[in-house]
Image (tube, rainbow, N blue to C red):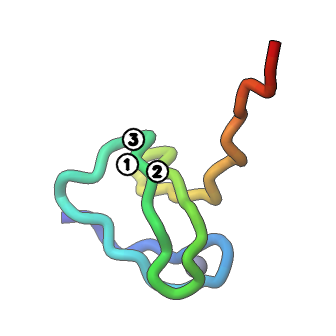
Amino acid sequence: MYSNAACPICDGSLNPDANTIVGELLECMDCGGELVVNSLAPLAIEEAPAAEEDWGE
Ligand SMILES: [Zn+2]
């Protein structure tokens, strides 16, 4: 069980569950922002980087 974390965007509370893994994408229930789990010990959640799409050729 991890302690609660705060959304880096809106400071809303997040509740990562026991299956949360590093690199997992979460969605903030308050602001809808995309977040990524950077670390579990200590728990660190950051705003997900914009997807690096391959734009092309
Ligand atoms: Zn948020």
Distance between the alpha carbons at the discs numbered 1 and 3: 10 Å
Left or right: 39 in relation to 46 = left
User: Which-is-in-front pick, marks 1 and 3?
Assistant: 3
Pointers 2 and 3 in contact (C-beta within 8 Å):
yes
Looking at the image, in which quadrant does ligand 1 appear? bottom right
Q: Which residue is mark 3?
A: 22
Residue at the spot 45% in from the left edge and 82% down from the top edge: 29
Vertical comparison of 39 with 32: above or below: above
**Dot 1: element:** loop
Total labels: the figure holds 3
Residue lying farthest to the front in this orientation: 57
The numbered dot on residue 13 is: none
Query: What kind of residue is marked 3?
Result: Val
User: Which-is-in-front pick, marks 2 and 1?
Assistant: 2
Distance between the alpha carbons at the discs numbered 2 and 1: 11 Å
- Quarter holding the C terminus? top right
Residue at the spot 57% in from the left edge and 62% down from the top edge: 34
**Dot 3: element:** loop
Query: What kind of residue is marked 2?
Result: Val
Disc 3 CB within 8 Å of nearest ligand 1 atom: no
Q: Which residue is mark 1?
A: 41
Distance between the alpha carbons at the discs numbered 2 and 3: 5 Å
Q: Which residue is mark 2?
A: 37
Q: Position of residue 44 (x, y in %)?
A: 50, 56
Location of residue 54 by image quarter? top right
Disc 1 CB within 8 Å of nearest ligand 1 atom: no
Vertical comparison of 57 with 21: above or below: above
Q: Residues within 10 Å of mark 3 (few under 14, many from 20)?
A: some
Left or right: 2 in relation to 26 = left
Q: Position of residue 16 (x, y in %)?
A: 31, 66
- Quarter holding the N terminus? bottom left
Query: What kind of residue is marked 1?
Result: Ala
